Amino acid sequence: MNQFETNQIKSRLRRLELSEEFVDQYVHKLQVNCESYRMACKTIDRWQKQDSREIVTQVLACGIIAAVLGGFLATL
């Protein structure tokens, strides 16, 4: 991994609000294990926090769909 890729990984980890110590340790581990940038990104992407607004939107959409379907079935 080159310096640019290392900085990109550090940036991704900082966006997850991880401690600077953890970021440094994780990058060191990646370098020792000779992991590729692509694999590191895939791993970090799995750690992404879900946006609470996204969850609320999904719940509201399901509720509206359920209400519409329930109203439709009630009229039959």
Image (spheres, rainbow, N blue to C red):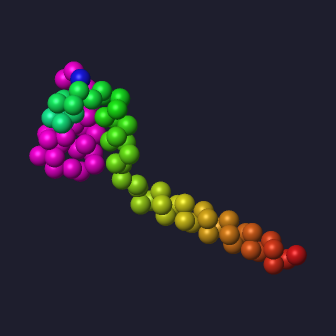
Residue drawn at (65%, 67%), measured in percent from left and top?
Answer: 64
- Residue 69 sits in which quadrant? bottom right
In the rendered image, the residue lying farthest to the right is 76
* Residue in the foreground of this view, choosing between 17 and 57: 17
- Specify whether 27 is left or right of 50: left
Residue drawn at (32%, 42%), measured in percent from left and top?
Answer: 44
In the rendered image, the residue lying farthest to the top is 2
Whether residue 4 is visible to the viewer of this picture, yes or no, is: no
Give the percent coordinates (x, y) of residue 31: 19, 29
Residue 67 is one of the magenta-drawn residues: no
Give the percent coordinates (x, y) of residue 59: 55, 65
In the rendered image, the residue lying farthest to the front is 33
Q: Is 68 rendered above or below residue 38?
A: below
Q: Which residues are magenta?
A: 2-26
Could you tell me which quadrant the N terminus lies in?
top left
Whether residue 60 is visible to the viewer of this picture, yes or no, is: yes
Residue drawn at (68%, 65%), measured in percent from left and top?
Answer: 65
Could you tell me which quadrant the C terminus lies in?
bottom right
- Specify whether 52 is left or right of 24: right
Residue drawn at (23%, 27%), measured in percent from left and top?
Answer: 34
Q: Is 39 rendered above or below residue 60?
A: above
Give the percent coordinates (x, y) of residue 32: 17, 30
In the rendered image, the residue lying farthest to the bottom is 74
Give the number of callouts: 0
Q: Is 43 rendered above or below residue 17?
A: above
Residue 18 is one of the magenta-drawn residues: yes
The kind of secondary structure the magenta stretch mainly shows is helix
